[in-house]
Image: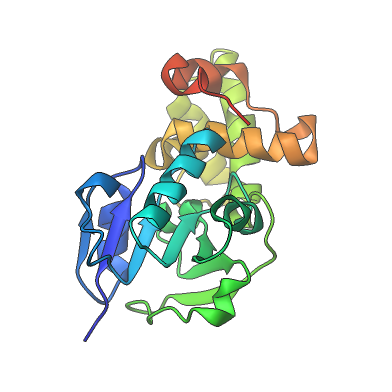
């Protein structure tokens, strides 16, 4: 029987992404709605935001008896997440930048990649294990490009003009600002913030991005 997948966290739009790639049924629900006596085989934890929010979500999943989690891991390593739950949970990190971007090669990370085999994804998608680092791979490439594109917008250029210039000059299928809209600006901000914390100021989110996200999430910048 094909395994069911439950999507939780602060990015409900990712449920549609997983329905396109997961071979079994996919549903989106809160952790509170989960039956602790019959937890799903796999849960996707989509939170990209304050680490306190991410930690709380994983602890709630563990309390509900979940043992296998696919976790959005551009803002925190899998090793850190496993430390939070103190064992008893196999966590495989995935890159939501690849997922939302509908990439064919999905990067995964963490020691559980080999211990908790994933069901085959639909279509031609391939899983590639990468080092367990903040930002993984695609986020390290795309988020700085988005950050630079935002700088031009902040200077007064129209987003459509910036996107078109990059599409024509670099042959990108989608401009960085349009891609940021698809990812969600909170994901862009928190991904860059995590990279800045780990790698230095060259990844610092542009103030325009911070203003775009607003204060509702940023007020909870708790390590």
Identity of the residue drawn at 46% across and 15% down = 215
Q: Position of residue 131 (x, y in %)?
A: 70, 65
Q: Position of residue 43 (x, y in %)?
A: 35, 61
Q: Position of residue 217 (x, y in %)?
A: 45, 23
Above or below, 182 against 1 in this view is above
Identity of the residue drawn at 41% across and 36% down = 184
Q: Report the side of 132 relative to 91 (left or right).
A: right
Q: Nearer the viewer, residue 144 or 65?
A: 65
| Farthest right residue in view | 200
Above or below, 185 against 9 in this view is above
Query: The N terminus is located in which quarter?
Result: bottom left
Identity of the residue drawn at 59% across and 44% down = 75
Identity of the residue drawn at 44% across and 62% down = 70
Q: Position of residue 112 (x, y in %)?
A: 57, 73
Query: The C terminus is located in which quarter?
Result: top right
Q: Nearer the viewer, residue 68 or 198?
A: 68
Q: Nearer the viewer, residue 114 or 12?
A: 114
Total label count?
Answer: 0
């Amino acid at each position: 029987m094909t395994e069911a997948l439950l999507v939780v966290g602060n990015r409900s739009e990712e449920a549609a992404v997983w329905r396109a790639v997961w071979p079994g049924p996919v549903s989106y629900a809160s952790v509170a709605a989960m039956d602790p006596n019959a937890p799903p085989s796999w849960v996707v934890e989509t939170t990209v935001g304050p680490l306190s929010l991410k930690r709380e979500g994983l602890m709630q999943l563990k309390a509900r008896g979940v043992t296998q989690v696919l976790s959005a891991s551009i803002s925190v390593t899998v090793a850190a997440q496993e430390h939070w739950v103190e064992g008893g949970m196999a966590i495989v990190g995935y890159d939501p930048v690849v997922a939302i971007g509908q990439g064919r090669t999905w990067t995964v990370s963490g020691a559980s990649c080999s211990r908790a085999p994933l069901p085959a994804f639909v279509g031609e998608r391939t899983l590639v294990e990468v080092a367990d680092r903040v930002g993984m791979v695609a986020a390290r490439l795309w988020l700085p490009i988005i950050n630079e594109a935002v700088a031009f917008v902040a200077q007064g250029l129209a987003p459509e003009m910036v996107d078109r210039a990059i599409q024509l000059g670099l042959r990108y299928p989608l401009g960085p600002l349009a891609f940021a809209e698809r990812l969600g600006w909170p994901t862009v901000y928190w991904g860059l913030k995590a990279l800045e914390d780990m790698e230095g100021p060259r990844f610092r989110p542009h103030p325009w991005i911070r203003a775009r996200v607003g204060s509702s999430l940023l007020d909870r910048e708790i390590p």
